[in-house]
Image: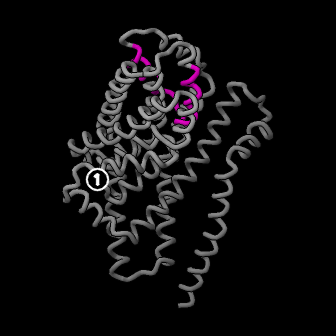
Amino acid sequence: MKLLQNKRIQTIGAISIVLPILVLVYIFLIPIADFFVFGIGNFTPQTHLAQAIHFFIYDTIKILILLFIISTLMGIVNAYFPVERLRIFLTTKKMYGLQYVFASLFGAITPFCSCSSIPLFIGFVKGGIPLGVTFSYLITSPLVNEVAVAMFLGFFGIKATVIYAGSGILLGIIGGTILNTFKLEKHLTPWVQDIQKQAGNENQVWEQDHTPFVDRLPYIIRDGWTIVQKVIVYILIGIALGAAMHGYVPQDFFTTFLAADSWYAVPLAVILAVPMYANAAGIVPVIQVFVAKGVPLGTALAFMMAVVGLSLPEATLLKKVMTFKLLGIFFGTVTISIILLGYIFNIFL
């Protein structure tokens, strides 16, 4: 009994130290990245190399912290919230598509880029939430957030903002609904399927033994850290690709090809955007430059949506949780949807 109490005290003590440190690091990420790049590294600001390295350090730390915290929080939710009942409810009750609406709206209010939203996607999948509903979140989350909406309103006015935000949410709803019809759960990687099974078995044992929260917590934290370890290589590769594109590809490279008023401009914008990586708020000022240089707004919006929703770094991370077939279906559905939206934008804007 005394040994168990000591273990509980150690767990609480470790959390009380580690959690505030993670929160502080997340809050001061930009100064920390500045310190490493411009202080220790002594790189000249505004150079391509400095921008790429700064981007890599900032996003790597941010995503690793988010992945650990969100995985741990989802572990706590899975341990106490009847996720299995929610899964059964979502798969058996007639909700007339409202589940996809709620998932897309939740994605719109979470201020995550594509790579940052993946930890929550893993948590949803781990909890047994239907894959189509999870896809609705994954599609909308990087496309729309409150910061990007505010910036878009200032740059392009209310009409363009409403169309941008509404189409992003609509894309998540339609994309999740379409993908759900394919019954794609079998195309999740064995690693994710094992996580789902282990989470279910672990929760059953805890419920049968009436295990208190403080005794569950070390296992939940361990599982969160295990997820970080399993995907860290994919995170580093994905962010390195994004950092290289972010630091070295000039804006004029894109405007040269996209300013032409031709039928292929929209699909070309989507293709050129895939290797890029940025969040919606970061890409909005770039879109303003594009439009000022003659790129049609619909083509520019298609480029923006492809940057934040179809990035190569995102694909690298998702490869850990999806097979190539599922990854192809997901990206193909979103790509076609963005191209169609681009044409619609050019007609009405």
Q: Position of residue 228 (x, y in %)?
A: 51, 53
Q: Position of residue 298 (x, y in %)?
A: 43, 22
Residue 2 seen in render: yes
Say if the magenta span includes residue 276: yes
Residue at the disc numbered 1: 130
> With 203 as the anchor, is 141 left or right in this view?
right
Q: Main secondary structure of the magenta part?
A: helix
Of the 4 image quadrants, the one containing the C terminus is top left
Q: Position of residue 261 (x, y in %)?
A: 42, 9
Q: Position of residue 274 (x, y in %)?
A: 45, 27
Q: Which residue reaches farthest bottom?
A: 1
Q: What residue appears at the point 38 percent right and 22 percent down from the top-left corner?
A: 348
Q: Which residues are magenta?
A: 265-289
> With 49 as the anchor, is 261 left or right in this view?
left
> With 14 as the anchor, is 77 left or right in this view?
left
The answer to which quarter of the image holds residue 267 is top left
The amino acid at mark 1 is Pro
Q: What residue appears at the point 33 percent right and 48 percent down from the top-left corner?
A: 101
The answer to which quarter of the image holds residue 126 is bottom left
Residue 237 seen in render: no
Element type where label 1 sits in the image:
loop
